[in-house]
Amino acid sequence: MHEPTPIALSVDIEDWYHSVLGLSEGDWERVPDRVVETTETLLRVLADGQARGTFFVLGHVAARHPDLIRRIADAGHELACHGYAHRLVHRQTPEQFREDLQRSLEALDRAGAGPVRGYRAAYWSITREAAWALDILAEAGIEYDSSIYPTRTPIYGIPDAPHDPFRLHTPAGHSLIEYPPTVLRFPLRNLPIAGGIYLRLLPYPLVRAALRHCQRRGRAAMVYIHPPEFDPAKPRIPMPFAERLLHYTRLDAMRVKVPQLLRDFRFAPIGELLDKHIPRDTLPEWSLSSHP
Ligand SMILES: [Zn+2]
């Protein structure tokens, strides 16, 4: 039997406060930084599991901690872009989005990242209404995007988008590769299984069975994790109940589940998967317009 395609391992490098919706860039100076320690914890976990992945780095982190970015690259991981200020794309104008993208690419460049091929939006927030953002990414030379979640939630998701990597044709006629996080198809909803809150909450045997199911079907799966999810002691500030659940539930889980995943599956960075395992000319094609 031939080896299944390795699973794409993706990491969003951001601090605990970047994804708190009630805090904006002006507040960030007033709260403690933990990203260096939490990223180093994560780097040790990945080194122990001999796994390499794609690190989507927030520009704000690259600007403040260029040494950390170099350590990530020195460990053999791929560097990619997570925007600068961690704002919802669908609440920005195209001009604001373009500026945030440029600012983040410049911060990565100054940190010595070299050419960057991939992009992931904050909160997976390239929705159908924000499809224009894909044109801006393509114009900036981004080769692959990983911002479209093929499910439905209050702030992100395009439920009818393909579940596996595909060539995406944008509203203005550009094209780039889209690499989605893994979902399983169920009658009422596509169920996310392999990252963030979903990975923290689902029992590990279920996650493993779901990923094996994907591999048997020849699917290219993707897992995503964040350094603050490895930090049970991260600071607590007032926030709405649902958001608190998202940020603080089962922060003990990742230090156990990620090493289990690394023992049970082979992983690779997205760029390497596109170069070696997933021939670009065989990718299915899909066009995204602003309306379904
Ligand atoms: Zn993020």
Image (cartoon, rainbow, N blue to C red):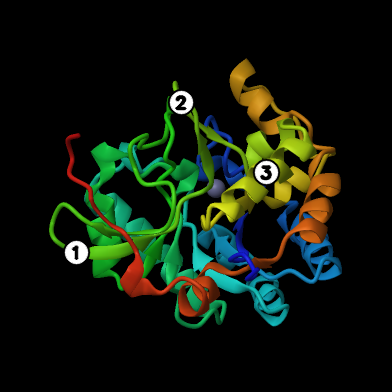
Find residue 72 and report its horizontal and vertical position in percent.
Answer: 68, 73
Which quadrant of the rendered structure holds the C terminus? top left
Q: Amino acid at mark 1?
A: His
Q: Is residue 33 left or right of residue 22?
A: right
Circles 3 and 2: CB distance less than 8 Å?
no
Depth check: give the residue in front, 189 or 232: 189
Label 2: element kind: loop
Q: Which residue is mark 2?
A: 189
Q: Amino acid at mark 2?
A: Arg
Q: Which residue is mark 3?
A: 16
Residue at (29% x, 51% y) in the render: 96
| Residue 31 visible in image | no
Circles 3 and 1: CB distance less than 8 Å?
no
Label 1: element kind: loop
Q: Quadrant of residue 11?
A: bottom right
Depth check: give the residue in front, 281 or 154: 281
- Relative to 155, is 164 above or below? below
- Relative to 168, is 89 above or below? above
Label 2 near ligand 1 (CB < 8 Å):
no
| Residue 184 visible in image | yes
Find residue 172 and report its horizontal and vertical position in percent.
Answer: 13, 57
- Relative to 120, is 204 above or below? above
Find residue 75 and report its horizontal and vertical position in percent.
Answer: 73, 78
Depth check: give the residue in front, 84 or 178: 178
Mark linked to residue 174 = 1
Which one is earlier in the sequence, the residue at label 3 or at label 1? 3
- Relative to 13, is 21 above or below? above
Q: Residues within 10 Å of mark 1 (few under 14, many from 20)?
A: some
Label 3: element kind: loop
Q: Residues within 10 Å of mark 3 (few under 14, many from 20)?
A: many
